[in-house]
Image (cartoon, rainbow, N blue to C red):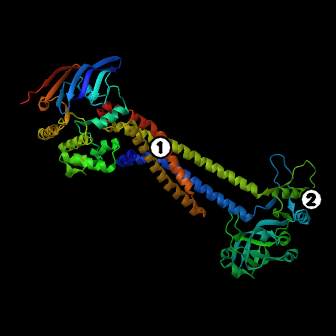
């Protein structure tokens, strides 16, 4: 009965000083909003990263030429097609190997000319990348060995040339001064963040090496490892083959590097963790500041209502009843702030998901948890003002001016 | 039978380093059903005496029996319980809760007494009709005249059937006609057997009581009973 009365008194009192009460809760609002946005954005980002890693397949390793670290310059020994062939010939692990030559060339078709990212690759490239053919076909190993001038274009290349990719199949184009015949179009993949496969052109590796770029140096070798081997085992094997190919003596450093995608995942996880820590910091400070603000306003409220407290005591209110009344007022104030914060935080998070094209999921426990935590802030910071109110002498409080 | 029995009560305050003797040994008794006025100039100890009899404060020394219960040794929540059950307060400036209806104001002592909701409503409405305000139950204090507000306060004082109705300058903020009406209400209650203690500095108001105690310098100067006519 006393509890119900206290709650309605608290709500009345907050309503009577609505503006003041809302201003007081701003820091609580910011704190709770940060928590909700953090949890939401954090979980969505994690899911997005996990998805992109799954797409790339965590079992794919990439080998790059080493750039040499610091002052200790390691001769920039390039990776070559023969390195890739050596990996293919090694039978310890039945991996699939995809060397790539990359570069930018101008593409001319009729009167249109664009600059395009060219990828010279083997036939296995398509399935290792997980791409699919929409129109026509990908080139074959025979096309590669014959250094045929055939090309497959990404789905949006046609649009850039003021026509459609579909219409370009079977047409001749000029790529860096060499005439190519377009034999296929890939399905739209969407940007992966650092490159857009839809805007690239794919040609056979040896064609790229002999006819377009004039080098047998490759930019990377991608190695797809079967599930029966761990990435670590595969890395050791790759190192063994390449050290032999590059004639690296015992104790010397590698002049190539192997990127394991799981390292990339770890880095992303770290970044997410730092981001989360930052937001937790903001949330913590805001809730602390908010709590002090609530305490301040409760002290003001106790002073303003000294006579009311005196009256309540004269009518028989116990210390506990007064204590409860003011604690409930502080807690109610914080819960209102918490709820507004949840609304703001979810809206912010929703906007981010719209722009990032993420899935919107806030766990109910996060909402409940942050509102409960706000309530605890109110409880903690409300106790002192409430005790002050409870301990007022009724005779003195009644005559307070 | 005495409702109030006060023996040799003293009250000392520490004001800075000085001890102020507000009451220096006061003794008297009040019988059930008496209508009594306590008078005295400011600084006489009248307010201190009122606080002690009203269980808002405890005496430094002496004994105070309320309905044969020793209350001078009680403190804090025990006194709150006594105030709730035994004493009904009426103040000069009404002391109503501004955002609550007349009925809610009247029910407040019952809420602290832990009376169930249905009973609160019934007794609250009864008390309001006793002071002639049944038609104004849902009005807030700001929608009531001064006289009406004071009658709400009287209803609130009566709602828990107290042993003593305690009125501190009840007509001090009212015009003479309204004041007269309120005094008439007190007379009616007195005739129904209610014990009433009136604190005032106006002779005219005190003259309405059957008995007047004058306080001066922390002592009882005189205790006069009116001749029954």
Q: Is residue A382 above or below residue A85?
A: above
Seen in the picture, residue A120 relative to B6 is either above or below; the reply is below
Identify the residue at horizontal 82%, vertical 71% (top origin).
A124
Residue B164: image x %, image y %? 23, 34
Q: What is the C-alpha distance between the residues marked 2 and 1? A: 69 Å
> Which numbered disc, 2 or 1, marks the residue that appears first in the sequence?
2
Q: Do discs 2 and 1 share a chain? A: yes
For the view shown, which residue lies furthest in the front direction? Answer: B1
Whole-percent x, y for residue A321 in the image = 39, 40
Count of numbered badges drawn on the protein = 2
Circle 1 sits on which residue? A378
Query: Would you call the spot at circle 1 few (<14 residues within 10 Å), some (14-19), or many (20 or more)?
Result: many
What residue is rendered at 67% in x and 69% in y?
A: A190
Left or right, A9 with reference to A279:
left
Q: Is residue B21 above or below residue B157?
A: above
Residue B102 visible: no
Query: Residue A66 at what x, y percent from top left?
Result: 83, 54
Q: Secondary structure at mark 2?
A: helix
**Chain that bears disc 1:** A
Residue at 81%, 58% (x, y): give it.
A231
Query: Is the residue A275 above or below the residue B24 in the image?
Result: below
> In the rendered image, which quarter is residue A161 located in?
bottom right
Residue at 33% x, 49% y is B117
What residue does disc 2 label? A245
Q: Foreground residue, A19 or A68?
A: A19
Q: Are marks 2 and 1 in contact (CB under 8 Å)?
A: no
Q: Residue furthest toward the top?
A: B18
- Residue A53 versus residue A129: which sits nearer the camera? A53
Question: Crowding at label 2, few (<14), some or many (≥20) Cα neighbours within 10 Å?
Answer: some
Label 1 sits on a secondary structure element that is helix
């Amino acid at each position: 009965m006393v509890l119900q009365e206290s709650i309605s008194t608290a709500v009345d009192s907050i309503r009577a000083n609505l503006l003041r009460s809302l201003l007081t809760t701003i820091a609580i609002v910011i704190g709770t909003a940060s928590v909700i946005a953090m949890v939401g954005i954090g979980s969505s980002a994690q899911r997005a990263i996990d998805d992109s890693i799954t797409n790339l397949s965590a079992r794919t390793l990439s080998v790059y030429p080493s750039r040499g670290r610091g002052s200790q310059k390691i001769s920039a020994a390039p990776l070559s097609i023969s390195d890739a062939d050596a990996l293919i010939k090694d039978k310890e692990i039945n991996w699939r190997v995809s060397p790539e030559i990359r570069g930018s060339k101008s593409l001319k078709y009729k009167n249109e000319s664009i600059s395009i990212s060219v990828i010279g690759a083997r036939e296995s490239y398509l399935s290792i990348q997980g791409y699919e053919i929409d129109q026509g076909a990908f080139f074959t190993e025979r096309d590669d060995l014959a250094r045929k001038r055939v090309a497959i274009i990404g789905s949006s290349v046609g649009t850039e040339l003021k026509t459609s990719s579909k219409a370009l199949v079977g047409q001749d184009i000029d790529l860096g001064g060499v005439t190519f015949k377009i034999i296929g179009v890939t399905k739209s993949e969407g940007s992966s963040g650092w490159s857009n496969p839809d805007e690239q052109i794919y040609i056979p590796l040896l064609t790229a090496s002999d006819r377009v770029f004039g080098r047998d140096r490759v930019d990377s070798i991608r190695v797809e490892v079967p599930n029966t081997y761990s990435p670590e085992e595969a890395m050791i094997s790759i190192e063994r083959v390449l050290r032999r190919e590059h004639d690296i003596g015992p104790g010397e450093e590698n002049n190539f590097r192997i990127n394991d995608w799981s390292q990339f995942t770890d880095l992303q996880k770290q970044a997410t963790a730092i981001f989360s820590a930052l937001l937790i910091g903001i949330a913590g400070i805001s809730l602390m500041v908010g709590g002090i603000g609530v305490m301040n306003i409760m002290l003001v409220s106790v002073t303003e209502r000294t006579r009311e407290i005196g009256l309540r005591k004269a009518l028989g209110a116990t210390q506990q009843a007064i204590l409860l009344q003011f604690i409930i007022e502080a807690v109610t104030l914080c819960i209102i702030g918490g709820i507004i914060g949840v609304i703001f935080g979810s809206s912010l998070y929703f906007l981010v998901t719209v722009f990032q094209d993420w899935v919107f999921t806030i766990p109910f426990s996060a909402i409940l948890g942050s509102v409960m935590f706000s309530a605890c802030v109110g409880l903690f910071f409300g106790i002192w003002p409430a005790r002050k109110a409870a301990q007022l002498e009724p005779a003195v409080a009644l005559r307070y001016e | 039978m005495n409702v109030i029995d006060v023996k040799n009560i003293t009250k000392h305050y520490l004001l800075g380093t000085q001890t102020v003797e507000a009451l220096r040994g006061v003794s008297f008794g009040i019988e059930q059903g008496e209508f009594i006025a306590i008078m005295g100039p400011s600084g006489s100890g009248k307010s201190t005496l009122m606080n002690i009899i009203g269980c808002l404060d405890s005496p430094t020394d002496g004994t105070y029996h309320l309905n044969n219960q020793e209350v001078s040794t009680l403190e804090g929540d025990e006194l709150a319980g006594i105030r709730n059950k035994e004493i009904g307060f009426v103040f000069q400036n009404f002391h109503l809760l501004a955002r609550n209806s007349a009925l809610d104001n009247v029910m407040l002592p019952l809420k602290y007494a832990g009376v169930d909701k249905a009973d609160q409503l019934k007794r609250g409405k009864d008390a309001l009709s006793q002071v002639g305000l049944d038609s104004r139950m849902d009005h807030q204090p700001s929608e009531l005249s001064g006289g009406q507000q004071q009658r709400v306060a009287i209803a609130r004082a009566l709602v828990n059937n107290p042993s003593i109705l305690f009125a501190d300058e009840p007509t001090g903020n009212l015009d003479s006609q309204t004041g007269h009406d309120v005094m008439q209400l007190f007379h009616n209650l007195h005739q129904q057997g209610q014990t009433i203690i009136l604190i005032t500095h106006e002779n005219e108001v005190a003259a309405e009581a059957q008995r007047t105690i004058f306080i001066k310098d922390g002592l009882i100067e005189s205790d006069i009973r009116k001749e029954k006519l």
